[in-house]
Amino acid sequence: MLVFSQTDVIDNFDTCIPKNLNSKFVVMKRLTLLFFILTYYSLCASECYRYHTKTNYKIISKNEKCYLYTTIIDPNGVSIVNRTIILLKDISSKNIQLISEGNDGLIICNQVGYYWIDKNTDTFEAKGVKKIIDKNKVSQVFGLHAFCINGKWKHLTYDINTDRSTIKDLKKFPNNAKIIHHSTAGRGSCYLLKDNTKVFSYDEDAGEINEIENLDAATTNFQLSDWDYDDHFLYDHNTFLMIDLNFDNIRDVTADFKKLGLKHNFTQAKFTQNFSAELVLDFNDGSLWIYNKNGVDLENEESVLFYQIKHATFLPHIKYILHNKNLYSNNFDLINDISRFDVAEVADLKSLNEKFSVFYDKFNQYKIVTNSNGTNIFKKETNHSQNSTILLDPLVNYEGVYSYLHSMPQFYTSKGFIFFLNDNNTIEKSIPYKSKIKNLKIAYAFDNKLLIENQVIENIADYDTIEFIGSSVDEISGCDGGNGQTDIVIEYNYYFKDKNAVYFYHSNSNKMNKLENKKPDSYNKSNFFETLLKK
C-alpha cells in the first residue's frame, strides 16, 4: 500500500504531470488538485472534516444591540456547517464595525473605543469583550497591531489573560500605507508596503518595520513565484530583487541582467510563466530572459539566476518557448538544449494551440512521438479520434463544486452535450441537453433535470424561476478515529425555490422534495439559516 503525506501530495503534484501535457490553465490545475485532495483525504489516516472548513466572522447591530456571528463554512464556500450568534454585552452598537482579524482574535470598534474578541470559545466566555484603547486616541489602524496613537505609529499587542496592552514604537511605519503584497505563509503575517516614496517590509506579529532600500515606490512591482516557499521577485525600473515569503531575506540580482547586456527598464518586461510555471521575462526585443533558481554557470565561471536566450519566442497559447525551430517546455531544458520538441511538421506555429493534450493549428492536429534519439516530434495526425474531434470544437467550461466527499468536477458543453473528462482527458461521461444550463451555485439546472453532487436527478421545480436558497451540512462522523478505522460521513442539505414552492434535496437521495406550507417569497439567501433551519 502506498502512503503519501499531505506535503508529498501537494509538493509533488506538478511533477506527476506528463511533459507533453500543457498547463495553460493553471487555475484548472489548482482546482483539479483541490478536487483530488478533498476526495483523497477520505483514505488518509488522522483526517477530520474540520481541517478543511473555514470560519467567517461578522459584527451585526440589531435593535441597539451588538452580536457576533460566527459561521463555519464547507470547502465549497457555500454550505453552512454551523452558525453561532453571541450577544456582545456591555458594548455600544453605535458605529460598530469589524476592523481586523488575526489567528487568535478580532479587533472591533465603536464610537467609544477599540476592543479585542478572542477566538477561543472558552477564553471568550470567561473574559468577554475587552477594551484595548480609547477611540479618540487613534487616527488610523493597519491590520491587527499597528495603531496611529496621538499622531505616532505604535505596535499594540493585547494579552487577554493579564488584561494588559503592550505598546512599542513603529517609527518608520508609513502613513496611508499601500499594500504591495500580504503573506501569511511562513512564520506569520508579513506585508510589503509603500508610501509615496519608499518601500517597506512589515512583520506584523513581531512589530518590525524596515525600509527596503534602492527602490522607487512609484515604479515598484511584486511578482509571485509558483510556490510560496521559493523566492519571489520585487523590482522597480532599475533594481531587481529576490525576496523570501517573509520579506526579510533579500538578494539584489540586478547585476545578473546587466552583465549579460540588458539595457531595458525592468518595468518594460512582460512577466509570464512557461509550461512548468517558471518565470520568463519578455522585453519584446527578440530575446527572452529565463529564470533558473539553481543558477546558470557562465563561461567565466560566474553564475546568474536570469539568463538571456537570444532569438527566442514565447508561445502564449501553449506556454512553450520556440528557439532554433524547436520547442521547450521548461527553462532547464532550454538552457541545456535537451528534451526539445521538433516542430518541423507543424504547418502554422503562430496558431499552434492545445486542448486536453491534443495539439492543433488552424490546419492540422498533431501527436507527439519520441524517436530513438530522445527527440520529441510533432507528427501530423491523419486519423482523428472522435474524442479529439469533439474536444477541439468550441467548448464552454462550467466550474465544479468542491464539497467534501461529494464533489462534482468541472465539465464542458458542446453541440448539445455535457462532457465530463477523466484523468487522461478523454470523455468519461456525456449527457444530452436542449435548454440553457442554469448555474445554481452548487448545482446546474437544464431541461427538467438537476445536476448535483455529480448526479443527474429530476428537477421538480420550475426551470425558469428556480433559485438556490442555501445549504447546510450534516456532520455525521467528522473524523476517521486517528488511524482510519472510522468512516468519515458528511452529508449535505440543499434548498431551492421557484415561483410556487420551496424544495429540498439531501445527499444521495436521488430525489427532490417539495416542502409543504413554505411560501417562496419568505425565504432567500440572507435569511436562509434563521428561517428554514430555524437557528
Image (cartoon, helix red, strand yellow):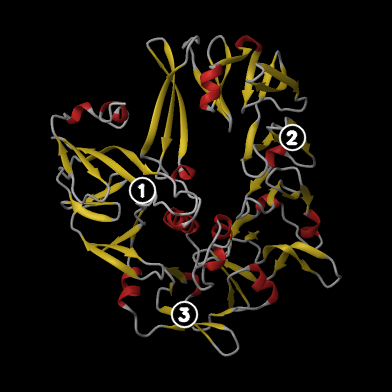
Please tell me which of labels 3 and 1 falls first in the chain: 3
The residue tagged 3 is 347
Mark 3 residue crowding within 10 angstroms, few (<14) / some (14–19) / many (20+): some
Q: Give the mark toward the camera: 2 or 3.
A: 2
Q: Secondary structure at mark 2?
A: loop
Q: Give 430 or 380, whichever is nearer the viewer.
A: 430
Please tell me which of labels 2 and 3 falls first in the chain: 2
Residue 507, percent across and down? 27, 48
Q: Give the mark toward the camera: 1 or 2.
A: 1
Give the side of residue 90 with respect to residue 151, left or right.
left
Mark 2 residue crowding within 10 angstroms, few (<14) / some (14–19) / many (20+): some
Q: Amino acid at mark 1?
A: Val
Please tell me which of labels 1 and 2 falls first in the chain: 2
The residue tagged 2 is 198
Quarter of the rendering containing residue 137: top right
Residue 64, percent across and down? 41, 9
The residue tagged 1 is 489
Does residue 415 appear in the picture of this structure? no
Q: Residue at x 70, y 35 (%)?
A: 203
C-beta proximity under 8 Å, tags 2 and 3? no
Q: Amino acid at mark 2?
A: Lys
Q: Secondary structure at mark 3?
A: loop
Residue 234 lies, with reference to residue 126, above or below; the image says below
Q: Secondary structure at mark 1?
A: strand
